[in-house]
Image (spheres, coloured by chain):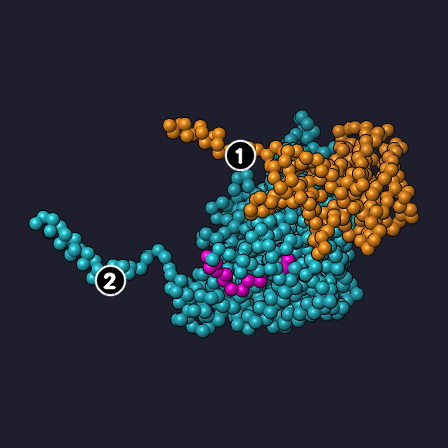
Chain colours: A orange, B cyan
Amino acid sequence: MALGFGLGSCAKDNFEPPKSVLDGRLVYQGEPILVQSANANGGNVSDFPVFFELWEKAYQNRSSIRVPVKQDGTFSAVLFNGDYKLTIPNGQGPFLWKTTATNAPDSLTVNLNGSQTLDLEVTPYYMIRNAQFTTSGRVVTSTVAVNKIITDANAKDVERVSLYVNRTQFVDAGNNIKAADLAGSAIPDLNNVSIATEAIGAIVPSQNYVFARIGVKIAGIEDMIYSPVQKVNLQ
Amino acid sequence: MKKFSIALIGALALNAGCNDDKFLDIKPTNILLVDEVYNDPRLVLSAITNLYNRIPDYQEPGNFGNYAAFDEAFASRDYNRHRFRDYSFDEWNYWDYGYIRDINLFLERLNTSETLTEADKARFAAEARYLRANAYFELVKRMGGVPLVLESLTYDYSGDAGYLRKPRAKESEIYDFVIKEMEEIKVILPRDANEKSRATYGLAVATKARAALYAGSIAKYGATTPTVSLPNGEIGIPATLATGYYQTALAAAQELINSGLYSLYQKTPDLSENFANIILDKAGNPEVIFVEDYKLRSGKVHNFALENQPRGITEEGDVGGFLNPSLNLVQSFEKLDNTFAPLAIKEGNEDIVYDNPEDLFAGRDARLRGTVLVPGSRFKGRPIDIFAGLLLANNSILSGDQLGQFKNVPEPSGPSVQVVGASGPIQGRNGSAESGFYIRKHNDPALGSGQIGTQSEVWNVRYRYAEVLLNAAEAAFELNQPDVAVTYMNQVRARAGLNIPLTSTDITFDRIVHERKVELAFENHELWDYKRWRIAHLVWNGSNTDLTTDPSKATAPSTRVFALYPYKIYNPGTANHNKWVFRRVNLNNVTESHNFRLGNYYSRISDGIISNNPLIIRNPNQ
């Protein structure tokens, strides 16, 4: 009989694991918002460069579930079914999230019942468009157009435009073997920005390609906005 | 008959018990009741000792791992510190309202005591108020404005705890509270410079100066990071208040300076040794204001010396050398002519050859060798033996993978020669001076301090007079009184052997930052200073920047720890045989650059706290 209890409790005590997937993208009018990757070397799982928060309504002593945004602007979280409030805290990301009348971050309700795809619409300060990468020898050159999206009282200047190069596809301000910076004040025409790295030194172990990406640092905003990662071949 | 007699005996027994009142009134032998404690000055002292023991510190010798969290040192063995990029938003957080409540209870119970003398009561109360204000200072440094609770809160079991909820005070209100408390208790506390581990007049005034300086710089430099603020002032102080706080800071620091109670420690003729002794000397030390004391054979000892003794002279098997100061810090000590320069290891592409390894560090601020054990130094009377290998005639390097290893030169048949120091460095080998340096500050030179069974009683210095002078200098500089600032700063510099006085035009923000960096390295100031100046996100900016060539620049990025390895030239018969060259080394274990985000300026208040008290609003950027 004791054995019977033991077996029974194994089956009854355990929760079903969560299996509903909430995934989607951060977008501005259909274009993905590209940000910095979470630490490529692993490490801190509780803090991500850009994330949003989910708060499950049914749960009494609430704490948030933080969902990181990947470098291609997508996100994915495995959750229990239920009603969630989704919000993006102040100061997250190179964009503005809608706010309430009292200027607090607004939230939207997500009723999760099975897997669901969700595009989150935000308003970036700038978008990077038409990024072109070329190489000559071991120098990577890029031309981009940096388009100002927010032009009202919330508008911010470009602090700098940076070109990052790395061995792997994780490439951004924190993960690079070569970087080139161009101060915003030195850019006459944001629609036509050209930036080149110095020659890239020997890569160990050797490889004849790198990954490159343009990032724009906006004055007073911590998170940068990025162009898509592109693989370029070195000679 | 039988039944009757049992009942009778029972009745008699009960009766006997009832008559003996004392039976129900036996004093427990293992519990002291509240009114017993608060009516005996010795027991009150032990109660407040517990409160002293709970003062929060961040970097301290008893918990030295945190010394390597930034760019001052490399953490041998604890490599993860150098493999993570971001600081967690939870880092440095503190929310110990249990401690605050215990202090409030202490004050309330002290008040009801009947037999304590008024003098005892007043001093204990002032000490408890010091500890409470100090706890709020720690809270505001880490979290910003917090609920200011000044009485013990008690739940009434009504089912609604709402009346216990308090919103966050403004950041400036917490600083004002600390300043006001210090002002009120300083006259009650003893004016005794020999009292180092309990609150004194000197400590209250020094704390007031520090708190006002912090508030002033947050008010002034907070303007450079406008997003690090909340609309109601829970975080951020209006810039208009800066001058007032700086005036308070300068006045308090000057009050302590002019009191003559403390002076700079200048007992030892050797200036570097003198600098190390500021921390080590417990006998009539005129500089130290407030410490957490340790005592051998008392149970309160720490393992700083055990874990950080040079490996070549370790007293305990394979232990030691875990904290390795960085080249970043070492090269920031200036030259005796008041100029800055990276260490001279190359001229063009040629190595510069030195007769002795310590010659590279000659002609620099004496505080360098009072803070760091450089190659060629001696510790506990013995050479610490740091060298990374032999530089052979064909320009190749012969090194080993064992401490103090011998190899045949040339291989395989030549004479057997030591090819690596008994203290390393060997990359990736724990404790082997992996950055090329060992730590001297806080490191106990007493024999036996490196043994597990003995350990160290070097105290944890929380306040010392040199900081008060630097606080005065900074406040005066910010108040546009550079001639006042320069006199205070020159006192600190002269003690370190920098005998050419600075002039008032030399005093800049960069100078202030730099002076605190080298004087107060490894003394739990760097993080809090960089936060209040709002330069932490510029210095630890997450980029893979190289070692700065301008160590005087306050905002030069310094995100990775660099190392410097000495090599011995092996070329018998030539002039350079057995001389030394140095190479800068990028450590394999330093794979990421420190990134201090705007959300790190104030630590995260956990969701659990906000859940329990919705009046608490969150810190921004997290």
Task: Give the percent coordinates (x, y) of residue B599.
Answer: 68, 50
Residue bounds of the magenta highlight: B142-157
Residue B514 shows up from this direction: no
Q: Secondary structure at mark 1?
A: loop
Residue occupying image coordinates x 77% and y 56%: B339
- Tag 1 subunit: A
Residue B151: within the magenta?
A: yes
The residue positioned farthest toward the top in the image shown: B412
- Disc 1 to disc 2, how far (Cα)? 58 Å
Query: Considering depth in this image, is A224 or A65 the residue closer to the camera?
Result: A65
A171 relative position to B305: left or right = right
Q: Name the residue type under label 1.
A: Phe
Magenta: main secondary structure:
loop
- Tag 2 subunit: B
B293 relative position to B350: left or right = left
Task: Give the percent coordinates (x, y) of residue B127.
Answer: 51, 66
Label placed on residue A15: 1
